[in-house]
Amino acid sequence: MLSTQDLGSRALRGSVWLTSSHVLIAGIQLLRDVLVARLLLPEAFGLIALVRFFLGMIQQPFELSLDVALIHRRERFEEATVAHAWLKGALALVAFFLILAGQRVLRQWYEPRVVQGLVILGASSILQALGSTPRTLLERRLRFGAISGLMLSNTVLQSLVAILLARSGAGFWSLLIADLVAMVFPSIGCWWLARPMVMRAPSPDLLRWFLTFSWPMWIGGLLTVFIFTIDDFFMGTFAGTTLLGLYTVAYTMMKRPTQVVTHVLNRTWLPVYARLQTDRASLSALY
């Protein structure tokens, strides 16, 4: 059991790791955005924005803030890890089946590439969901250096894929494949870093606990995704994908700095506060 001072020191080191990596990542992403924007037509960015919107709106109802619940959990933690992995995988499968079921409706309103991209990323999100448990374990163990290295590697790989495919004339598909890489590669890396993990049948009472614990945060998460992405839906549906593409590139570049700050604070201090949830004196001293 780490002391309060040790927890604070590890959290500060984690903040330094994550801040440094996120500043570097933001710089790489900005350079990638500029280069790819010069290689692709605005329509490609509008199409991928619609794909991301529909994927987010279908997936978010099944997110349930399970990662936060696992970080918070203290008793029967190994069993809770198994239940978390089963729930994440099962919910991702349900979301993917909804995507398959809704194809016909979407094809009536949007061009085939939007639907095709949604199905591809929906399938990839199953692998992404399976990587959620090891990633959460790494955060809970305060292994921010490993997480930072993996995130940086993922950004470099995703950027290279996007730029090279855009230069080859892949258009919209260069952005889609880059998103696919960004979903799959970190999951593989997290499984490798967090090993070993033993899978077995989940405990029904822990499955119920996850669902009960998470639903208040689920409401907030759903509203957040809706508020921050509904503009993409209206722009792409009523103004067209070209205008949405121009809007998406500008908005993405604008929000890069805020993402650095919010991500570092959320990822670093949540596991620390969770460890001290029953020790108010230590929590106050650390704060």
Image (cartoon, rainbow, N blue to C red):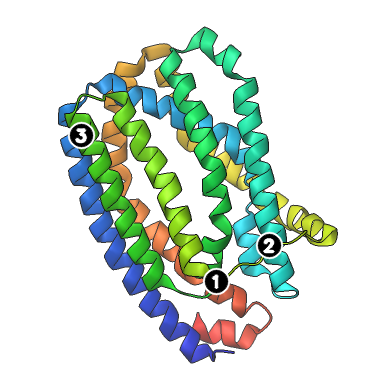
Q: Position of residue 220 (x, y in %)?
A: 61, 46
Q: Which residue is mark 1?
A: 140
Q: Nearer the viewer, mark 1 or mark 2?
A: 2
How many residues crowd around disc 1 within 10 Å: few (fewer than 14), some, or many (20 or more)? Answer: many
Q: Mark yes or no: residue 72 visible.
A: yes
Q: Residue at x 53, y 46 (%)?
A: 127
Q: Which mark is residue 280?
A: none
Which residue is denoted by mark 3 in the rendering? Answer: 36
Q: Quadrant of residue 213?
A: bottom right
Q: CA distance from mark 3 to mark 1?
A: 36 Å
Above or below 136: residue 229: above
Which of 33 and 153 lies nearest the eye of the viewer?
153
Mark 1–mark 2 Cα distance, whole angstroms, equals 19 Å
Which amino acid, by three-letter code, is at mark 2? Met
Q: Which residue is mark 2?
A: 199
Pick the front one: 30 or 250: 30
Give the SS element for disc 1. Answer: helix
- Dot 2 surroundings within 10 Å: few (below 14), some, or many (20 or more)? few
From the image, state whether disc 3 or disc 2 is nearer to you. Answer: 2
Q: Is residue 172 left or right of residue 285?
A: left
Residue 253: x and y, percent? 26, 41
**Mark 1 touching mark 2, by CB under 8 A?**
no
Residue type, label 1: Arg
Residue 64 visible to the viewer: no
Q: Quadrant of the N terminus?
A: bottom right
Determine the image quadrant of residue 31. top left
Q: Residue at x 54, y 89 (%)?
A: 2
